[in-house]
């Protein structure tokens, strides 16, 4: 038996077998004076991550096609998948944006023209561009234009200039303080979008030549090798193989290794800055990352507009469970705290993603899991749910898709049925 997760989710969204679905799309009608509820915008590295982002509470998603977005090594979307993604997203009343933020070369232009026409016909809600040539081509379509952070907009004059060129939204550079963002907001009527969570470049996004210089892979064409996070030593040219440390301690030196951005601790100030959209970085990250980060920020934004905002331990626990480097508030608070990590470039995490719940039978209290990581009988696991609270249990019985009893689930995407101690929502993530 094989279970199609997309169909499961679609049924779920349409309310088949679930009484609570009216609550899925957050109530956005409540406003506090002078402060509109911002959009929560999440990365969609592939169709599964797009589903996770929307089901766990994002208002909008952004994706890249097979070409012309700055994630050349991500899964990215075929034309057919883009059509499917637009239908799915619009079916939930949410928005979908296409990243077309490469710096184009002459040889790209014909294919870019065709691609933009396709996105227009597919009815994506906007395209993210950074190259002025791409912006001019997008203007020949009906597409809304968002200026990508790759364009490095750091002042209101630049924002107004892009607005005059036809952009309806500006994604500001990450390197801005709160005061600078407020100043741009006061002086430019275009929508503003800022990053609130995820990995950062050590250079201004889009102005880095490190990867291209060291490996030939161009960050400005979506092929960054993250060379800034490598471990560096000094070599004298006649002493090949002798590495001289340039760091402060025995673990080496990661002089260009940035922490990950996390604006949760100051989300109230972020919201009060009046920006229209709050963006999560991570098209290359896992479905577990997307679901976890989106659920936390969804809850935090909603709690602010419910008049009940305070940082909750469960949010911090969740952000610490997913793979991440030490967190920083970056430039937003302008508090002088270091944004680099000198000890290691490896991200840490405290939970393993084991599978997705694609069906639940309340009569037998059985969850059907599509496997993503190895798990076995007697293992302690937790279920991270789109809306309900996380719960833990021990796996006491496991059966394969044919109903045969099994002791472990070692095969990729194997369908496994396990007994659960509580009702579990479809699209819950099972984790260790
Ligand atoms: S090498 Fe580092 S700083 Fe440069 S583009 Fe890649 S991630 Fe950004």
Image (tube, rainbow, N blue to C red):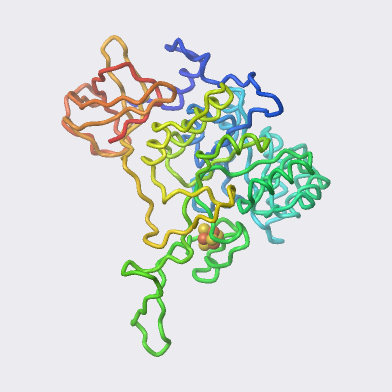
In this rendered view, identify the residue nearer to me: 301 or 9.
301
Horizontal arrangement in the rendering, residue 295 relative to residue 146 (left or right): left
Name above or below for residue 119 compared with residue 153: above
Give the total number of marks visible in the rendering.
Answer: 0
Splitting the image into 4 quarters, where does residue 307 fall? top right
x, y percent for residue 385? 39, 25
> Looking at the image, is 16 positioned above or below residue 267?
above
Examine the image and state in which quarter residue 97 appears.
Answer: top right
- Residue 117: x percent and y percent? 72, 41
Quarter of the image where the C terminus is located: top left
Looking at this view, name the residue that lies furthest to the front: 335
Left or right, 402 with respect to 327, comes to: left
Residue found at the far bottom of this picture: 238
Residue at 29% from the left image edge and 33% from the top image edge:
414
Q: Quadrant of the N terminus?
A: top left
Location of residue 345 by image quarter = bottom left
Q: Residue at x 64, y 34 (%)?
A: 272
Residue occupying the point 43% across, 25% down: 386
Residue 233 coordinates in the image, percent (x, y): 40, 75
Query: Which residue reaches farthest right?
Result: 164
Q: Return the x and y of residue 270 as percentages of the image width and height.
A: 60, 38
Specify whether 171 is left or right of 357.
right
Q: Nearer the viewer, residue 242 or 272?
A: 272
Instruction: Say left or right for 209 vs 183.
Output: left
């Amino acid at each position: 038996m094989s279970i199609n997760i997309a169909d499961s989710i679609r049924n779920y969204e349409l309310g088949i077998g679930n009484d609570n679905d009216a609550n899925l799309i957050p109530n956005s009608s409540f406003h506090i004076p002078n402060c509109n509820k911002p959009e929560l915008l999440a990365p969609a590295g592939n169709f599964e991550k797009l589903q996770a982002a929307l089901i766990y509470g994002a208002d909008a998603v952004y994706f890249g096609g097979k070409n012309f977005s700055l994630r050349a090594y991500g899964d990215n979307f075929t034309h057919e998948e883009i059509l499917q993604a637009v239908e799915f997203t619009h079916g939930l009343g949410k928005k979908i944006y296409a990243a077309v933020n490469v710096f184009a070369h002459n040889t790209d232009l014909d294919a870019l023209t065709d691609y933009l026409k396709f996105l227009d016909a597919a009815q994506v809600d906007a395209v993210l561009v950074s190259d002025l040539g791409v912006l001019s081509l997008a203007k020949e379509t009906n597409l809304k234009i968002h200026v990508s952070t790759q364009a490095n907009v750091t002042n209101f004059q630049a924002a107004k200039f892009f607005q005059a060129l036809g952009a309806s939204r500006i994604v500001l550079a990450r390197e801005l303080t709160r005061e600078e963002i407020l100043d741009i907001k006061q002086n430019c009527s275009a929508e503003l979008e800022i990053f609130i969570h995820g990995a950062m470049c050590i250079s201004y996004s889009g102005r880095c030549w490190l990867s291209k210089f060291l490996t030939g892979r161009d960050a400005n064409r979506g092929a960054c090798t993250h060379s800034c996070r490598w471990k560096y030593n000094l070599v004298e040219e006649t002493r090949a193989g002798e590495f001289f440390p340039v760091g402060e301690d025995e673990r080496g030196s990661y002089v260009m290794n940035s922490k990950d951005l996390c604006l949760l601790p100051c989300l109230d100030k972020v919201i009060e800055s009046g920006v229209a959209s709050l963006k999560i970085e991570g098209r290359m990250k896992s479905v577990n990352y997307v679901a976890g980060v989106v659920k936390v920020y969804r809850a935090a934004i909603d709690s602010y507009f419910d008049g009940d905002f305070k940082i909750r331990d469960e949010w911090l626990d969740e952000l610490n469970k997913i793979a991440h480097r030490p967190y920083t508030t970056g430039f937003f608070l302008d508090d002088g705290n270091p944004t680099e990590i000198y000890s290691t470039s490896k991200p840490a995490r405290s939970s393993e993603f084991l599978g997705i719940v694609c069906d639940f039978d309340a009569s037998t209290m059985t969850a059907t899991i599509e496997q993503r990581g190895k798990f076995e009988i007697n293992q302690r696991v937790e279920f991270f749910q789109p809306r309900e609270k996380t719960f833990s249990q021990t796996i006491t019985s496991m059966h394969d898709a044919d109903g045969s009893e099994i002791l472990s689930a070692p095969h990729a995407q194997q369908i496994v049925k396990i007994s659960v101690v509580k009702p579990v929502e479809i699209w819950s993530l099972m984790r260790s």
